Image (tube, rainbow, N blue to C red):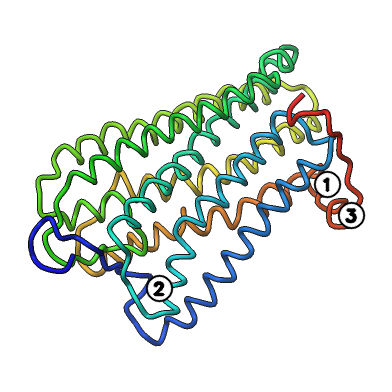
Amino acid sequence: MAGGNQTSILEFLLWGLSERPEQQRILFLLFLCMYVVTVTGNLLIVLAIGTDTRLHTPMYFFLASLSCADILFTSTTVPKALVNIQTQSRSISYAGCLVQLYFFLTFGDMDIFLLATMAYDRYVAICHPLHYKIVMSRQRCTLLVTACWVLTSLVAMTHTFLIFRLSFCSKKIIPDFFCDLGPLMKVSCSDTQVNELVLLFLGGAVILIPFILILVSYIHIVSAILRVPSAQGRHKAFSTCGSHLAVVALFFGTVIRAYLCPSSSSSNSIEEDTAAAVMYTVVTPLLNPFIYSLRNKDMKCALARCLRGKVFFSLGQGPPR
């Protein structure tokens, strides 16, 4: 973005995590630790599920897919933020910004779609247990995850193309620690009405439709659980859904706050938006392995066997059965 015209955009400046110099070292160490724990925790989830044939079921197949998406989601933003803190540089190239935006949207939307898919899996398992193996077959699970990847790629491609057609006429500071749709539209010097409409309708649909499907699924699930005669059966059913509900509440709460309730461009509002972004880009992927493993006996046993090196693996068997 050297020069002042609209065609010489070379780089943006990122607001970062904080403007206070005394906080940079603490933030670097904090986010480095969070990133390492996130990647390690989610990799352990994937390894435990992949190496223990007793976890080769649809529920754990989707959980492994969610862990992979979380690793990629966090890796899209945090490493660049750490490099900028360490080098005391806020710059990101124009091409690098668009690439980061595309993958951020792809993996972020993948989290949303996978959470909805996991809710559907629990709905079929609890409300239609006799048809579960037929409905959630290996082919159906693979098809669902593939469809999620295709849809998220198309949505991300649409938003990225619309940002590509915008003009940025001076060295602008993006009010966030990574390239996202809202902050990029705020610093554009061209008309963003089309982008805003697409973000409202397409982005709103990507967030709200899965969220509504999750709510409807859990209304049916809770209704079915309450009809279970034994207290032990109700407790077991609720325990399998509690972890998923905790992740849904944490992730969707911060995403809806960031995208459907945007704030103004004041300094305090930027800090609030950054805090919300940290919640769903860093904190949620960090907590997912703990939430799913601490509340799940099978997962805890698989992780213990994995860490002890006592793994069970069948080369000829796919993830779900």
| Amino acid type, mark 2 | Asn
Q: Check disc 2 and report its element: helix, strand or loop.
A: helix
| Position in image of residue 282 (x %, y %) | 50, 59
Confirm or deny contact between disc 3 and disc 1 (CB under 8 A).
no
Along the line of sight, the residue nearer the viewer: 210 or 183: 183
Q: Residues within 10 Å of mark 1 (few under 14, many from 20)?
A: many
Instruction: Identify the residue under disc 1.
Output: 302
| Position in image of residue 146 (x %, y %) | 55, 28
First-in-chain label (3 vs 1): 1
Instruction: Identify the residue under disc 2.
Output: 84
Q: Check disc 1 and report its element: helix, strand or loop.
A: helix
| Position in image of residue 303 (x %, y %) | 80, 51
The label shown at residue 309 is: 3
The label shown at residue 158 is: none
| Amino acid type, mark 1 | Ala
Compute the Cα span from label 3 to label 2.
38 Å
State whether residue 43 is above or below residue 256: below
Along the line of sight, the residue nearer the viewer: 278 or 94: 94
